[in-house]
Image (cartoon, grey):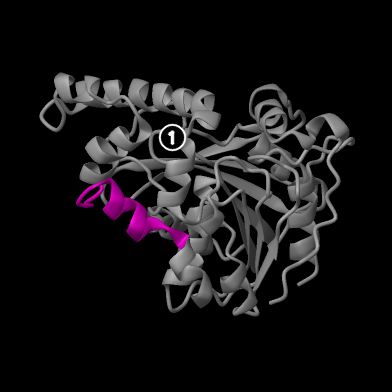
Amino acid sequence: MPILQASYKAPYFFRNGFVSTVYSGLIRKVKGVKQQRERITLSDGDFMDLDWSYGKEKSNKLIILLHGLEGNGQRPYITGTARLFNDNGIDAVAVNFRGCSGELNLKYRSYHSGATEDLDEVVNHISQSKQYTDIYIKGISLGANLALKYAGERNEIPEQIKAIVAVSVPCDLNGSAKELHKLKNILFHENFRRYLVRRLKQKQIQHPNNLSVETLNSIKTLNDFDEIYTSKAHGFKNALDYYTKSSSLQFIHSIKTPTLIINAINDSFLSPECYPVKAAKNNSNVFLEMPQHGGHVGFVTYNGCYYNEKRALEFVESL
């Protein structure tokens, strides 16, 4: 599919990728979303929490929202989309990945960029109700990689899923990991590392036989975290094996569901390989937008409704 011309024009101050990323992650507030929590039990005995919000009338349409690294269902980039879709008669469910809902999950494993088996369980759980004939999936960052991998790695996905929207996608995980370790991203790197290690300390107490205190204290980078914990806890040989097998880039050519990808050119988290131009051109189901500005999930507008949220609604309504 030809690459789409993005119409996004960032407000002057937010043309700086760092500013738009920090503002959107730390300062933006979204009000007016009332969520109801549902806990589901997974096939391995663990749990995940789903946060539901609804339009004014009963709807047969639903958007499933997937957060990013160390996110949750209350992050503004999630609730902003939920509010817009609810206002337009579409229900929303924000998925909290394992251990991200404010309560430590039960297993030593947690979530990662390629854990599509958990998304599959969520989709199957929702599909069983038969209420929703049209289901959309929107992922942000890590959640976007997860959504694309889910859509492309399977021969078939449930027919109720009508569209995928992926925003700020690190679809080449190894390339993105290298970018996050560069000096330009040191503040973001340290913030992510600190939160991940803090949670892993809780998990070490919960599962002392799986991880020693000494090994935990040796984690100085995100790559260390993936080498020591993510890969080992989820059945990969090492961090590189995890990045290679979990990257969605290799699956985009197989996507059969209408899919919109929005990656800003000035997103400092993304390597050149994270802009899947060739894959989009060779797959009529995939639409790729590459706005000049927007940083990482920082598509600020004057009216408070972010560009990626508006485009997600436009995209699903156009189908």
In this orientation, does residue 247 appear?
yes
The residue segment tinted magenta is 234-248
Q: Relative to 195, does residue 39 appear above or below in the rendering?
A: below
What residue lies at 64% left-to-right and 35% top-to-bottom?
Answer: 35
User: Percent from the top left, x then y, of residue 305?
Assistant: 82, 40
Residue placed under numbered mark 1 in the picture:
181
Furthest residue to the front? 183
Nearest to the observer: residue 17 or residue 111? 17
Query: Which residue is depicted at the point 61% across and 48% down?
Result: 168
- Which percent across, then down, holds residue 105? 33, 34
Is 114 rendered above or below residue 218? Answer: below
Q: Quadrant of the C terminus?
A: bottom right
Asked if the magenta segment contains residue 83, the reply would be no
| Number of numbered labels in the structure image | 1
Relative placement, left or right, of 65 versus 290 is left
Q: Residue furthest left?
A: 209
Q: Where's the N terminus, which quadrant?
A: bottom right
Percent x, y for residue 271?
A: 53, 50
Q: Nearer the viewer, residue 120 or 113?
A: 113
